[in-house]
Image (tube, rainbow, N blue to C red):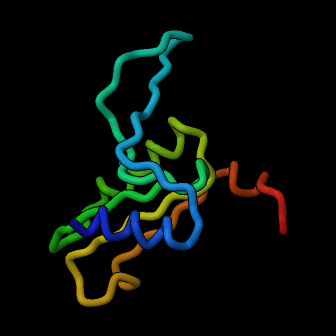
Amino acid sequence: MYEKCLIQELKEQGLNVRSQVLVPIKYKNTSLDSDLKLDILVNDLIIIELKAVEIMIPVFKAQLLSYLKLTGKPKGLLINFHTENITNQLVSLVTEEFAKLPVE
């Protein structure tokens, strides 16, 4: 439910939002079948991974970092909805691609 609500909020802000986007995997110049999916992709730039857990464990951050590397996207957000204050449970990651983005 929180995923659908977040998607609606992002769309109301005029952002291009896609959910459950398949992550392509290439190995030795071959595309492999994958069941990896991004929770949300915003403006084809920002990956948002959503959790609803009592404790954020390091593997969640590693998962987001892997998705960023596999897709070449510049920024990722890991958000835990099982908290009183989401900003306390928000992890922001950027890759080398972030530095290549135009400054507005």
Q: Is residue 72 left or right of residue 54?
A: right
Q: Position of residue 20 (x, y in %)?
A: 35, 44
Say which quarter of the image contains residue 98.
bottom right
Q: Is residue 79 left or right of residue 102?
A: left
Residue at image location 34% in from the left, 25% down from the top: 34
Q: Quadrant of the C terminus?
A: bottom right
Disc tally is 0
Q: Quadrant of the N terminus?
A: bottom left
Q: Position of residue 64 (x, y in %)?
A: 41, 51
Q: Is residue 101 left or right of residue 91?
A: right
Q: Position of residue 100 (x, y in %)?
A: 78, 52
Q: Residue furthest left?
A: 54
Residue at image location 23% in from the left, 83% down from the top: 83
| Residue 47 or residue 62, whichever sits in front | 47
Residue 85 vertical placement versus 57 (above, below): below
Residue at image location 59% in from the left, 48% down from the top: 44
| Residue 98 or residue 81, whichever sits in front | 81
Residue 86 vertical placement versus 66 (above, below): below
Say which quarter of the image contains residue 25.
top left
Q: Position of residue 82 (x, y in %)?
A: 20, 76
